[in-house]
């Protein structure tokens, strides 16, 4: 294979990763709203995060602590185009040795 093509492919991959990480850093943080803080008329649900599919019966992402689980959930909500998260619930499954799991609703404010 041509060394110039390989170098161009590697450079392209590096640039894609750099652009994606810069875009993620520039994105506004996703806010977690407490129960009762918003009325139902102030938002629309974008997506259920990690509880809305049949796959959740067999596998859910777990983390070592609640902060990591919340960060993963808000990151997934940001990927879905949400402004915030409501109905956030975190569970700790130490009996199976899995760790923390959080789920909630990704929302878009009106």
Image (tube, rainbow, N blue to C red):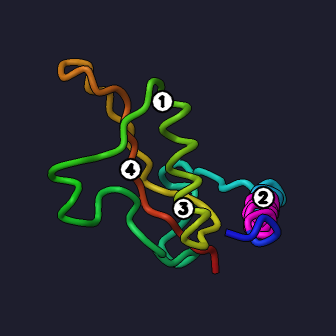
Task: Count residues near mark 3 (Cα–Cα under 10 Å), then give few for <14, some for 14-19, many for 20+.
Answer: many
Asked if the stretch drawn in magenta spans residue 14, the answer is yes
In contact (CB < 8 Å): disc 1 and disc 3: no
Q: CA distance from mark 3 to mark 2?
A: 25 Å
Image-quadrant location for residue 110: bottom right
Closer mark to the observer between disc 2 and disc 4? 2
Determine the residue positioned at 48% across, 72% down: 40
For label 4, the residue is 103
Q: Residue at x 75, y 61 (%)?
A: 10
Comparing marks 3 and 2, which lies closer to the viewer? 2
Q: Choose between 104 and 64: the one closer to the eye.
A: 64
Residue position marked by numbered label 3 in the rendering: 77
| Spatial CA span between label 4 and label 1 | 11 Å
Q: Residues within 10 Å of mark 2 (few under 14, many from 20)?
A: few
Q: From this viewpoint, is residue 27 visible?
A: no
Give the number of the mark in front: 2 or 1: 2
Q: Which residues are magenta?
A: 6-18
Q: Is residue 41 left or right of residue 53?
A: right
Name which residue lies at 52% across and 58% down: 76
Q: Earlier in the sequence, mark 2 or mark 1?
A: 2
Helix, strand or loop for disc 4:
strand
Is the stretch drawn in magenta largely helix, strand or loop? Answer: helix
What is the x, y in percent for residue 107?
Answer: 53, 69
Residue 54 falls in image quadrant = bottom left
Dot 2 corresponds to which residue?
14
Determine which residue is flagged by label 1.
66
Element type where label 3 sits in the image? helix
């Amino acid at each position: 294979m041509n060394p110039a093509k390989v170098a161009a492919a590697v450079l392209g991959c590096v640039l894609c990763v750099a652009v994606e990480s810069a875009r993620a850093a520039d994105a506004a943080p996703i806010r977690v709203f407490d129960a009762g803080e918003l009325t139902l008329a102030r938002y629309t649900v974008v997506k259920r995060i990690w509880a809305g599919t049949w796959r959740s019966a067999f596998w859910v992402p777990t983390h070592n602590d609640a902060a990591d689980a919340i960060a993963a959930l808000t990151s997934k909500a940001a990927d879905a185009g949400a402004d915030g998260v409501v109905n956030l619930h975190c569970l700790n499954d130490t009996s199976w040795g899995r760790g923390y799991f959080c789920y909630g609703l990704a929302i878009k404010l009106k």
